[in-house]
Structures are given as C-alpha cells and as structure tokens.
Amino acid sequence: MYDVIIIGSGPAGLTAGIYTARANLKTLCIAGNIWGGQLMQTTLVENYPGFPEGIQGPDLMLNMRKQAEKMGVEIIDQDVTRVDFSKLPHEVYVSDVSYESHATIIATGAEFKWLGFPNEQKLIGRGVSACATCDAAFFKDKKVVVVGGGDSAMEEALYLTKFASEVIVIHRRDVFRASHIMQERVRAHPKIKIMFNTVVTDVLGENKVEGIVTTTGNIVCDGLFVAIGHTPATKIFENQIKLDAKGYALREQEARGIFIAGDVHDHKYRQAITAAGYGCEAALDAERYLSENSQHGS
Ligand code: NAP
C-alpha cells in the first residue's frame, strides 16, 4: 500500500515524486519500460532554468531521477497495464501484479503522432523517424524531408542539417505555427528548403525510404522525419478518468484522489519546466487531499 503512486517518469512525474517523498508520503513511481519521457530523446536543453550552459536532456532526467530516489521514491521501470480507480484504494496493475494507493498522480505524457500510412509504419527505423536527435546521424550526406510546421519540425530540421546534405521542410499550410526565432533560423539555413501548401500522401520504398508522394509531386529522399505533434498517453485510463475530445486528461478529478500533471493534459505549453511545475502542483494537491482525508501514513 502506497500513499501515492505516480504513473510516468518525465519531469512531471519525477518532480511530483521529489515533493511527495519529501513530504514523507510513501511513494511509488511506475516509470514505464522506457523511463524519462521525451527529454530522453533530446540533446541540448537551453531553456531549463538553472543551467546557464544548457544541459543534455538525458542528463537532466537522470539528475531528476537520482533526486527522486534520494528523497525515497521507489521506482520500477515497467509499463502500467491496467488501472482501477472505481474504488479506494486505487489499484494500479503491472501485468498481473497489483499496487495499491490512496492517491494517484498521472504523468504519462504524450507520444509522437504519425501521418498514418501503412508504409510509414513499415519503414519506421528504415528511414522513417520522429526523432532527429536519435536518428539524424544515419543520414550523413543524405537528403531528408521533415513534415510539420511547429517548433518540433523546426528543431528537427535544424538538427538534421548537422548530418544531411539537404533538408526539405514540408508544411500543409502557407504559414508555420513555430515561434518566430525558430522559423527565422530555418529560413536562414542554406541547407534547408521549405515547401508550403504541400501534403505528404505516402512513403515510397520496400526495405528503406526511397521517396515520398505529395500533393505537389513525388520527391526522391532517404529519410522522412514526422514532426506533427503528439497524442496524450491516456489509453490505459479510458473509462477510468475524464478525458477531453482529443484524449487529454482533464485535471479536476481530485475528489477521487486522482491528480494529473504534465503533457498528458497540457497541450498548450508542453515544456519541461511547465511539466515540472504541474508535477509540483499535483504533489502538493495530493498531500493536502491525503491529510484532509486522514490517509497519510495509513
Ligand atoms: P505543434 O505545435 O502542434 O505543431 C504540429 C505541426 O504539425 C503543425 O504545424 C500542424 O499543422 C502539423 N500537423 C499536424 N497534424 C498534421 C498532419 N496530419 N499532417 C501534416 N501536418 C500536420 O507541435 P510541436 O511542433 O510538436 O510543438 C508542440 C509544443 O511544444 C509547442 O507548444 C511548441 O512550442 C513546443 N516546443 C518547443 C520547442 C522549443 O522551445 N525549443 C521545441 C519543440 C516543441 P498546422 O499548423 O496546419 O496545424
């Protein structure tokens, strides 16, 4: 029996753990088979306060994990497979093993969105990717396409220029939604070409990407980087918590001892620092909920 179970181990989950464990609440963090969240796939993070020279994403997450463990958070690196929040204590399952908690903090984040063609899925890891920082090095002196018009697409394109000979950014509208500074960097880069008002409709290639089909013609290329946003990781919570129309978790579920933190509900800011802030909020709310319901330490 735990006072608090935290599901997820990105900045939201680990910050929540630092706070709950420090408040002497018995805390279990079920971190996922792949722990750490999206920052594990990032390189230099320049906008997380406290690191004037920036910090590598995985290093930042490792520091947060060590800090949570030092405070006393138990961490297991497995995926939650099922939850039952219909009664108290909550039940959180990892395969057949059930863990019980008086309060649960959901911090499962969000996953990459894909364009949705069969060949796209088939060629993931063979030229199709959603993570330039993971895969860019495979495209030395190659021609690659990035799809999307947000900050992620700009970031992916700029990162790819370190390796690729040519980067084409394809966006479905005639204006990017990315921040001004990122757009300017992309527009100014000699290796990057921009195609507006173009929709990618298929990926070509049997065993590796050989090109793409678009509404403005076919393009021969070696890689396709999809940077079109994210889907909240809420599948296991369907019918257990309130979700909005896009599947993001709604936050006002505290009366049932359920607290929500980070990108799993935040489709607006999606920053490491905001996720950490939400993790802090969720932990403080859970602490207050437990003390008001006299369950702390029971
Ligand atoms: P986003 O801002 O939601 O942008 C997604 C882009 O993909 C949009 O341009 C969208 O087009 C396009 N798109 C969506 N579905 C599509 C589809 N099916 N086919 C083709 N294009 C599609 O997502 P994001 O870029 O991942 O950014 C998410 C948040 O994280 C933002 O708040 C962003 O500022 C932040 N972020 C910040 C940084 C940074 O500060 N360094 C880096 C990365 C992300 P439309 O524009 O037409 O909708």
Image (spheres, rainbow, N blue to C red):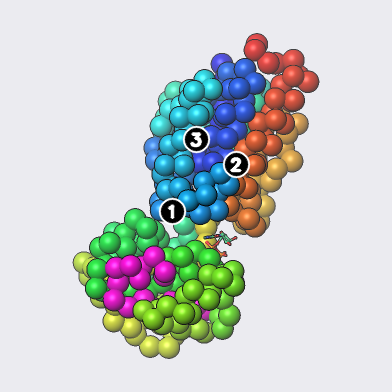
In which quadrant of this rendering is ligand 1 seen?
A: bottom right
For disc 1, the marked residue is 44
Given residues 130 and 16, the one toward you in this image is 16
Read off the residue under disc 3: 64
Q: In this view, does 167 lie above or below 11?
A: below
| Residue 256 point in image, percent of width and height | 71, 30
Q: Which amino acid does label 3 sit on?
A: Met
Confirm whether the magenta stretch covers residue 230.
no
Q: Which quarter of the image is occupied by the C terminus?
A: top right
3D distance between C-alphas at marks 3 and 1 = 16 Å
Q: Name the residue under label 2.
A: 276
Q: Give the class, few, some or many, for how many residues have Cα within 10 Å of label 3's Cα (few <14, many ≥20).
A: many
Residue plotted at (59% across, 72% down): 180
Identify which amino acid the numbered label 1 is placed on: Leu
Which residue, as the protein is rendered here, is positioned at the far front?
A: 52
Instruction: Point out residue 9 in the picture as x, y percentages from the top left corner.
Output: 50, 37
